[in-house]
Image: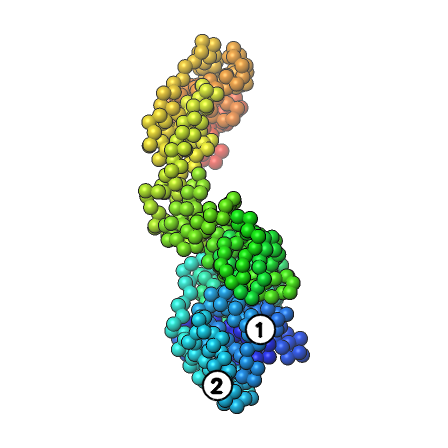
């Protein structure tokens, strides 16, 4: 089953809603005010099973200039446009504005529909056809099929259906194997179901019981159920009009412009670098000019930032432009957008997002070169650029989200000459020498500050843990041992008073047997200050001369080995806590921690309140 979404576009009162009703039999004007005034105010929806293999969803958009923002919320996810012009009025202001919006949004397929054909003579109808051919020349509608219809009489409707069917084979299906994204255009409550949101699934797929995040918030919700084109479904795929029943949230908490997608996959952004086409009919766009930024179903106030202290962007030109959004949004590279002025509120341009984690530039040249790579470079070139900009590198997942690529696409083209991939971490090889020097310096400083410790814990290192094996392999000055890193030349050399303290501490526990003294008391009697005494203790623990059985109790290894030999002589027997105390001659204070230690070491195993000796 193929699924396509068609959208209408055109001037008010040119018969878009009547056309959809004639095609599908569905009335898309659902609001009481729409029915009372006889005009479309908000987007409406219908669908038609054209063949057993093709289902088409229709989004009817308002034509009035006051409701262009609603039109923009519906037209962003369509596969083809039914570009409508009335035979009795021909091209009008919103005909032009809707046309520019469709062009700027990158819509590639469409049919020119001349409505109200029954109201004019054949000569006038031919004239309107010629006007539309001239109007659409050199655009995505150049050479498009033109169909004259009458929604009142039904004339031309079968021919329009055939044109849609023929055009459908040219439209590439949307990929359903990517990350799901559903820009929300409606949110409401249905009796017996709760919260419902609708939208056109622009990528990926959704299933009942799946977890989704409501972007730009951090709310994670559960999908209770799905409908596709008005019918219950076990899966919703990209390109389908989808209704999602959500649990754990009220419809008033969800607004048009929010997006459902995979939890934790993306980070909402407030600054985006874009490729902008400013319409020839617009005024020059000035630095810091306020605009309405429309993307997906969202409308956000934004401020224009021009590079290299440009004063303005010339009408009819293409430029790299930064937008600072008043509110964060889920945007990805390649997402199309439209900008409109504040006063008067008219469409002035549009384009596509290039970078969603914008860097700072002082010169346009630097920005232009970089954005050109991100906009039109290969996947490998874009990965190399982004990873190289971070001296610590980045995870495959982060790079994939940043570039709107799959993780497989990021792993695949990584050039080994320029990047190192360690596990799922990427780092530019040009940064490795810097990290090696930094690592050697950090380890050296640690040895100077902690001469009694064997090395610095790996968790304390400044370099990314994933590239540590490569750093250690490529330098002969460092050695990694278990959870530490040390200089190959580092040796523990105790001062005279430290050597004496070591003997005092070890002898205190060795002579105590299993009735050991308090740890703080032993350290206090070592003859050196507390900090160094604790370092000596850690040295003895690492050397396994002493063993820490609990937070408070430390035993000499020979005492524990003697206990192990004593227990081994009773292999297979059951021993209670009382019997253990009698056997060892110690109090419960020592007996319980030692038995728990024996359990951990597999000398014994618990059996109720007693132990079985292994």
Give whichever of 29, 148 is nearer the camera: 148
In the rendered image, the quadrant that contains the N terminus is bottom left
At a point 63% along the width and 70% down the height, the residue shown is 66
| Rendered position, 536 above or below 74 | above
SS for dot 1 = helix
In the rendered image, the quadrant that contains the C terminus is top left
At a point 41% along the width and 78% down the height, the residue shown is 165
SS for dot 2 = helix
Pick whichever of labels 1 and 2 is earlier in the sequence: 1
| Rendered position, 558 above or below 358 | above
Question: Which residue is identified by label 1?
Answer: 94
Which residue is farthest bottom? Answer: 121
At a point 46% along the width and 12% down the height, the residue shown is 498
Question: Which residue is identified by label 2?
Answer: 126
Residue 340 — which label?
A: none
Near mark 1 (Cα within 10 A), the count class, few <14, some 14-19 or many ≥20, is some
Q: Quadrant of residue 286?
A: bottom right
Give whichever of 383, 346 is nearer the camera: 346
Give whichever of 185, 288 is nearer the camera: 288
| Rendered position, 605 above or below 274 | above
At a point 40% along the width and 48% down the height, the residue shown is 383
Where residue 582 sits in the image (x, y, percent)? Answer: 47, 21
Where residue 367 sits in the image (x, y, percent)? Answer: 48, 48
Front label number (1 vs 2): 2
Near mark 2 (Cα within 10 A), the count class, few <14, some 14-19 or many ≥20, is some
Q: CA distance from mark 1 to mark 2?
A: 22 Å
Where residue 189 sits in the image (x, y, percent)? Answer: 61, 66
Q: Please, which colouring scheme is shown?
A: rainbow
Where residue 435 sits in the image (x, y, percent)? Answer: 41, 33
């Amino acid at each position: 089953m193929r699924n396509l979404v068609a959208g209408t576009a055109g001037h008010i009162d040119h018969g878009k809603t009547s056309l959809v009703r004639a095609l599908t039999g569905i009335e898309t004007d659902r609001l009481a005010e729409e029915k009372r005034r006889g005009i479309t105010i908000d987007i409406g929806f219908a669908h038609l099973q054209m063949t057993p293999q093709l289902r088409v969803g229709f989004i009817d958009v308002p034509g009035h200039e006051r409701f262009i923002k609603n039109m923009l919320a519906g037209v962003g996810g369509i596969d083809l446009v039914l570009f409508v012009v009335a035979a009795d009025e021909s091209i009008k202001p919103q005909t032009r504005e809707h046309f520019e919006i469709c062009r700027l949004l990158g819509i590639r397929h469409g049919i020119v529909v001349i409505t109200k054909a029954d109201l004019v003579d054949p000569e006038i109808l031919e004239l309107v056809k010629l006007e539309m051919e001239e109007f659409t020349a050199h655009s995505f509608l150049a050479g498009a099929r033109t169909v004259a219809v009458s929604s009142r009489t039904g004339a031309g409707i079968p021919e329009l259906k055939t044109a849609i069917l023929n055009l459908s084979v040219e439209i590439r299906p949307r990929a359903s194997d990517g990350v799901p994204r559903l820009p929300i255009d409606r949110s409401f409550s249905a009796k017996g179901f709760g919260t419902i949101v609708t939208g056109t699934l622009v990528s990926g797929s959704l299933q009942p019981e799946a977890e989704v995040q409501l972007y730009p918030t951090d709310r994670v919700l559960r999908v209770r159920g799905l409908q596709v084109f008005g019918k219950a479904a076990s899966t919703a795929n990209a390109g389908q009009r989808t209704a999602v029943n959500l649990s754990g949230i009220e419809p008033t908490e969800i607004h048009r412009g929010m997006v459902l997608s995979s939890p934790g996959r993306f980070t909402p952004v407030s600054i985006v670098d874009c490729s902008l086409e400013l319409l020839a009919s617009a005024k020059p766009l000035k630095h810091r000019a306020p605009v309405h930024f429309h993307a997906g179903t969202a409308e956000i106030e934004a401020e224009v930032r021009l590079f290299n202290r440009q004063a303005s962007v010339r009408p009819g030109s293409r430029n790299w432009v930064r937008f600072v959004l008043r509110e964060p949004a889920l945007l990805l590279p390649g997402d199309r957008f439209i900008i409109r002025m504040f006063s008067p509120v008219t469409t002035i341009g549009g384009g596509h997002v290039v970078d969603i984690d914008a860097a700072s530039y002082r010169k346009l040249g630097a920005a232009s070169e970089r954005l050109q790579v991100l906009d039109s470079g290969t996947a490998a070139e874009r990965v190399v650029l982004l990873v190289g900009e971070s001296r610590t590198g980045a995870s495959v997942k982060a790079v994939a989200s940043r570039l709107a690529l799959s993780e497989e696409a990021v792993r695949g083209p990584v050039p080994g000459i320029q990047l190192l991939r360690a596990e799922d971490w990427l780092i530019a090889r040009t940064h490795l020498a810097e990290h090696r020097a930094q690592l050697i310096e950090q380890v050296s400083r640690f040895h100077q500050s902690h001469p009694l410790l064997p090395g610095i814990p790996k968790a304390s290192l400044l370099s990314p843990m994933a590239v540590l094996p490569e750093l250690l392999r490529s330098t002969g000055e460092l050695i990694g041992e278990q959870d530490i890193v040390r200089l190959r030349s580092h040796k523990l050399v105790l001062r005279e008073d430290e050597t004496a303290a070591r003997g005092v501490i070890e002898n205190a526990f060795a002579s105590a047997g299993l009735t050991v003294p308090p740890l703080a008391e032993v350290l206090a009697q070592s003859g050196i200050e507390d900090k160094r005494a604790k370092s000596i203790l850690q040295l003895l623990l690492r050397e396994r001369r002493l063993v820490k059985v609990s937070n408070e109790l430390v035993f000499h290894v020979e005492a524990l080995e003697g206990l192990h030999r004593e227990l081994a002589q009773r292999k297979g027997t059951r021993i209670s806590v009382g019997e253990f105390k009698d056997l060892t001659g110690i109090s419960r204070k020592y007996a319980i921690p030692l038995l728990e230690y024996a359990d951990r070491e597999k000398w014994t195993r618990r059996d109720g309140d007693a132990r079985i000796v292994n």
